[in-house]
Image (cartoon, helix red, strand yellow):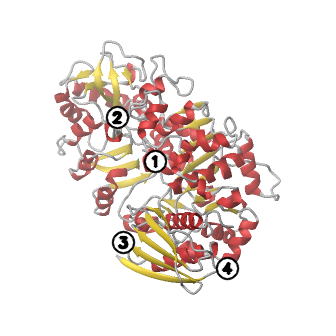
Amino acid sequence: MALHSCDTLAQNRQARLGRARTITGGKLLRPEQVTELLEAIIEPGDRVCLEGNNQKQADFLARCLSRVNPENVHDLHLVQSVVALPEHIELFERGIARRLDFSFSGPQGGRMAKLVGSGTIQIGAIHTYLELFSRYFIDLTPRVSLIAAQAADAAGNLYTGPNTEDTPVIAEATAFKNGIVIAQVNKIMDEVPRVDIPADWVDFVVESPKPHYIEPLFTRDPAQISEIQVLMAMMVIKGIYAEYGVQRLNHGIGFDSAAIELLLPTYAESLGLKGKICSYWALNPHPTMIPAIESGFVKSIHSFGSELGMEAYIARRPDIFFTGADGSMRSNRALCQAAGHYACDLFIGSTLQIDLAGNSSTATIDRITGFGGAANMGADARGRRHVSPTWLKAGQEAQGRNSSMPRGRKLVVQLVETFREHMQPAFVEELDAWQLMEKTGMDIPPVMIYGDDVSHIVTEEGIANLLLCRNEEEREQAIRGVAGYTPVGIARSRSAVENLRDRGIIKRPEDLGIDKRLATRDLLAARSIKELVRWSGGMYDPPRRFRNW
Amino acid sequence: MEQLEYEFDGAGSLRQSGPAVLVGVVSSGNLEVLVESAELGGRGRVVVNTSVRGFGEIWQAVLTDFAGRHNLANLLISINDAGATPAVVSLRLDQAAEEFYRGEP
């Protein structure tokens, strides 16, 4: 009987490093050596992680990989958070990569749908972030990872600065399974300000010709917030945050939730809610949070990533943000996703479509966009055991009086105007996700947040509390009852909706004591980017495209 | 452009005629609403000029609900719409009606 070999991965790693030694003797690479090194190190069929999120991108390494000779490097299996760059798509068009497991595709969603349709890209699965990171340690461990950092020293210690994001989880999964980690950095320093990734997890480092790209994804100009969004924010604050005493939460991206953030120092303060709501956050450093922070609303914020222009402000608010000994923030997407899932009592976010069961999706027929993090935030944590008053109240509402086992649940709020731009209804009989499933051969439709996880739907017409609905018909009428003049809303049973309103399952602004005439932009703590800069004492430095003065 | 016209029964007594009221602006996603007195035999008339065709039924539904909230007797309401959502339309109509009747019981 042959002895089963138990260190093939380590032997394979040594073979790869041996081939690399023909190109470089040390860890530091010159930019022009990178493509050659990738050809030497990467083997056909390898699982490769190309770091890139919707913020930080290992863009130089992506470009180098897209230039390798497909005769030598082909059939790669890419595992990565986000397919964001044109180079990511080129890898498939050139035959360098074939298979893809990912989480989000954003700007490349249209091209991706075409290439999946033609078989050029084979998708394993579309994941949520935490789910994909988890698989890095189970069945999708990368053989080679290409990551991005702010700086490195000669030994290979990496400094990620505020945008740590996905780097620790990728580097750990790869380095401790005998994989190879290659980092692009913006500069090589004698000594890094702090060590975010230790040198012995990193095999090669290259100083990128240009700093890595970062998208200012979480900046929302208050000038674009509408009166309708102000009205919806008032309903959320009074009808949900105050009602349940929500202290620990996560906000999705968008003008709808930015309006809530800008109403904390004004409307919420006038209701006496400071200290009673919105103290602890899992959240990127949204510039629209500055007035709430400066007004003393916020005790703590842990972040998935950073936000361009917020670095200096964050560094001067170490009581609020998680910062290192060097003063700058340390973000961590995996840990913040876990925190948002298990330690927050509420998630609120927008979506493109909601069906009659409350399932929501951002998929449209011609685009594969994926999930990102909202699905982790917007799901009840079934493994949660600690109690908070918010969690318990939500659980009691959901269980009614029938359950013998007390249990809480998370508040998951969908915040949408009944019509999106170009009069696209946000409420539909059937999600476009079903057609996308048919077209691309998925096993299940890509649902962002399942209806049974949603606790409330808020529109300009009012709040529907789905926790209190006792059967599917009630749930459907509660959703129709806030769906406005969409076809779904117009088809409501008026008597059923009035009955739900009498029982407090649907609440209109007037039921909440909200005077719609007060819903004006004057209620926003800041009405422009310039006013956010003023609130920050000049420490917020917005990207050029947001400066109009 | 599309022009739509709707008429509604006035509810309650006729009001004294006051000065015309204009709210809103004609910019993308918004609309302007002009409310003025007119001799309409106790009925109310709404004339909609909209840049977006094909939403007559939704206008009908939005305006019917509006007529249920306010007395439109002898009111002529003119709307110039630049693609506002029903939410914005309802808000502007309520603002205009409240402004027009301001100070009256």
Name the amino acid, label 1.
Gly
Q: Residue at x 34, y 26 (%)?
A: A150
- Which of disc 2 and disc 1 is earlier in sequence? 2
Q: Which residue is mark 3?
A: B51
Q: Quadrant of the C terminus of chain A?
A: top left
Q: Please say if the residues under marks 3 and 1 sit with CB atoms less than 8 Å apart.
A: no
Mark 4 neighbour class, 10 Å CA radius: few under 14, some 14 to 19, many 20 or more: few
The answer to whether residue A401 shows anywhere in this view is: yes
Percent x, y for residue A437? 43, 65
Q: Which residue is mark 4?
A: B13
Q: How far apart, in angstroms, are the residues tagged by discs 3 and 1?
A: 37 Å
Q: Which residue is mark 2?
A: A145
The chain under label 1 reads: A
Q: Residue at x 49, y 60 (%)?
A: A361
- In front: mark 4 or mark 3? 4
The answer to whether residue A305 shows anywhere in this view is: no
Mark 2 neighbour class, 10 Å CA radius: few under 14, some 14 to 19, many 20 or more: many
Q: How far apart, in angstroms, are the residues tagged by discs 2 and 3?
A: 52 Å
